[in-house]
Amino acid sequence: MKKLQCIYEDGDHKWYIIARDPAKPDYVIDTNEYLVCADGESIILDPGGIEIFPAVFSAVCEVFDPTEIKTVFASHQDPDIISSLSMWMEANPALKCYISRLWSPFIPHFGGTDETFINIPDEGMDIRLGGKLLQTVPAHYLHSSGNFNIYDPKAKILFSGDIGTALVPAEMNTSLFVENFDEHIQYAEGFHSRWMGCEKAKTDWCERVSAMEIDMLCPQHGTIYKGDDVKRFIEWFNQLPIAVAV
Ligand code: FE
């Protein structure tokens, strides 16, 4: 069973992470899903793949009626991000999915109809959640050609998709938060050098997010960067050679 844990709370504005399923088969990469709630509404960020759908669905049930979830956000097209779409649509056939305009013609191969997709333009757009606005932040080529992060300016949380991923060995992957940055970052290096495809996109992203107030940088795999570790991560990423097949 995946654990659901609240990482931010201000009244009914809440961020939950759904992570760390000890029952998950080892051959499936570990993922984090995020449920954001505000003013009685909810959105799931990168709801995940078919394999882990039952674990994510039952975790969501602990705090929110899944049939009431009206929107999901997909940072990009990968199977571990959005292949569960048709299963979420069984809970709510009117579900909307925000995704880059590049990927909306491809994702119906996983599920959805012409009513399902809301195309995010390359420059990004706001997503309304109750009375709050979430911003989609362009992160193209990091790693996907049409790729977005989500920034919550009120909570000061950046959901960074694959950026920030660390493939920490399972036995060490117990804490939700980075505890020792220097120890941790070795598990992020191979992933970022291989999967991140464009040097200019990387430096642009680093400049863009450096100007934002971020208390937590939350990746789709691995561990959350908090406080000063957010800046440390951005500086580390900025100087890392990428697009390297090692
Ligand atoms: Fe991916």
Image (cartoon, helix red, strand yellow):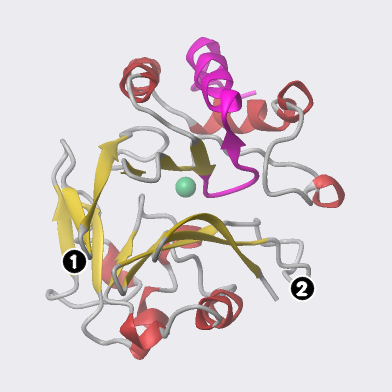
The furthest residue to the front: 11
Q: Marks 2 and 1: CB-CB under 8 Å?
A: no
The furthest residue to the right: 171
**Between disc 2 and disc 1, whose residue precedes?**
2
Q: Is residue 89 left or right of residue 184?
A: left
Figure quadrant of the N terminus: bottom right
Q: Is the residue marked by circle 1 packed among few (<14), some (14-19), or many (20+) residues within 10 Å?
A: many
The residue at 75%/42% (across/down) is: 168
User: In this orientation, does residue 126 appear?
Assistant: yes
* Total numbered labels placed on residues in the image: 2
The foreground one among 230 and 169 is 230
Mark 1, ligand 1, within 8 Å: the answer is no
User: In this orientation, does residue 101 appear?
Assistant: no
Asked if 222 appears above or below 28 in the picture, the reply is: above
Q: Is residue 221 left or right of residue 122?
A: right
Amino acid at pointer 1: Phe
Residue 4 in the image, given as x and y percentages of width and height: 61, 68
Dot 1 corresponds to which residue? 117
Q: Secondary structure at mark 1?
A: strand
The foreground one among 38 and 1 is 38
Residue 217 in the image, given as x and y percentages of width and height: 50, 37
In the rendered structure, does residue 229 fall within the stretch colored magenta? yes
What whole-number distance in Å separates the C-alpha atoms at marks 2 and 1? 32 Å
Quarter of image, res 110 = bottom left
Q: Please give the range of residues in magenta.
A: 219-246
Asked if 109 appears above or below 224 in the picture, the reply is: below
Q: Secondary structure at mark 2?
A: loop
Mark 2, ligand 1, within 8 Å: the answer is no
Residue 26 in the image, given as x and y percentages of width and height: 76, 62
Dot 2 corresponds to which residue? 23
Q: Is the residue marked by circle 2 packed among few (<14), some (14-19), or many (20+) residues within 10 Å?
A: few
